[in-house]
Image (cartoon, helix red, strand yellow):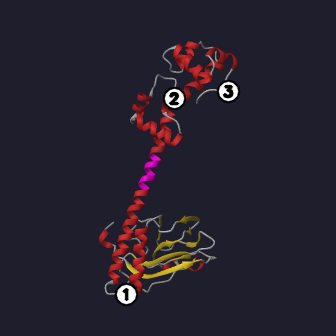
Amino acid sequence: MNYETINPCLRTAAYLAWNLKNIHKSVAYHMRFFAIRKNPAIVRIRDSETRVSQESLVILKPGIPYDFCNAADTEPFHLYSCNFDLTQEYRNTISSRNPVHEPNFVQEYVIDTAQALPELDDVIVLQNCPILCQQVQHIYELYITKQPYSEEIASGIIKSVLFEALQQQNSAKHMTAKSHHSAEIARVTLQYIREHCSEHINEQSIAAAMGYHPYYLSRLTQLYYSITPYRYLMQCRLEYAVHLLCSTDLSIGAVAEACGFSTQAHFSAFVRRETGMSPNVLRKNGWHGGTGTL
């Protein structure tokens, strides 16, 4: 993206106190800002519906079906809107077009397809951004008063809002991607523990196998699965121990070794602590959970 190619051309601006219900969604031929300045609203875009708070900004590229309605039954919401192109290319050659109801929209009439800013999503909803909303209101005031250089000032403000929105959009995507990556690390860690619980592993060896610090892995598994790697290791070992005790004739020592315990005494103490029974009693009576601490 070349920052210098973006030179917005303000087409129209408006202020509305909205309490109507539309049958059809609207579609615009230009890019649009909607700044919700008073009371929350519901915005329906394509097939999705989002509640937007007071002081929120909605940005739409051309050709996107949208509709607004009250979030409350009594108070209308107040918004400032403006239509604009990303460049001045068609400023003096093609007149602006007002939004139309979706059935009447003609794609070929779109003037500026926003290709000058491909990084910007088709739809951006920024909640609780009073400074950006104030800037959109300022654009409206410039459009109404038409003071000297108002078009140039409005163009600069539109550009500023666009790039601030782009920055927030990219930041949100980065945080989402980071969250997905963290969740995957937690999932793979617990999967590794289950697959290797019969081996002599501990928090340090698990962390080494995953390539992360033990504290970091513990924080992630607690965040996404509400359990630490150590507790999950003990849970997997207990499940495996119960299975071997109740379905095989292996000695207690052999079961202890198969479950990754260094000594039979350690294993017996662990089983008693978690189930309230010794390994021999558990083998005789069976165990279905409910008395341990897992």
Q: Which residues are magenta?
A: 173-181
- What residue is disc 1 on? 146
Q: Is residue 281 visible?
A: yes
**In terms of sequence position, does the residue under pointer 1 or pointer 3 come before the other?**
1
- What residue is disc 3 on? 288
- What residue is disc 2 on? 233
* Three-letter code, disc 1: Lys
- Mark 1 Cα within 10 Å, few/some/many (few <14, many 20+)? few
* Three-letter code, disc 3: His
Tag 3's secondary structure? loop
Rounded to the nearest angstrom, the CA distance separating label 1 from label 3 is 78 Å
* Three-letter code, disc 2: Leu
Left or right position of 150 against 12: left
> Where on the picture, by quarter, is residue 236?
top right
**In terms of sequence position, does the residue under pointer 2 or pointer 1 come before the other?**
1
Q: Position of residue 126 (x, y in %)?
A: 46, 64
Which one is in front, 259 or 74?
A: 74
Q: Position of residue 147 (x, y in %)?
A: 34, 87
Question: Vertically, is 195 above or below 8?
Answer: above
- Mark 3 Cα within 10 Å, few/some/many (few <14, many 20+)? few
**Residue found at x 52% / y 30%:** 231
Q: How many marks?
A: 3
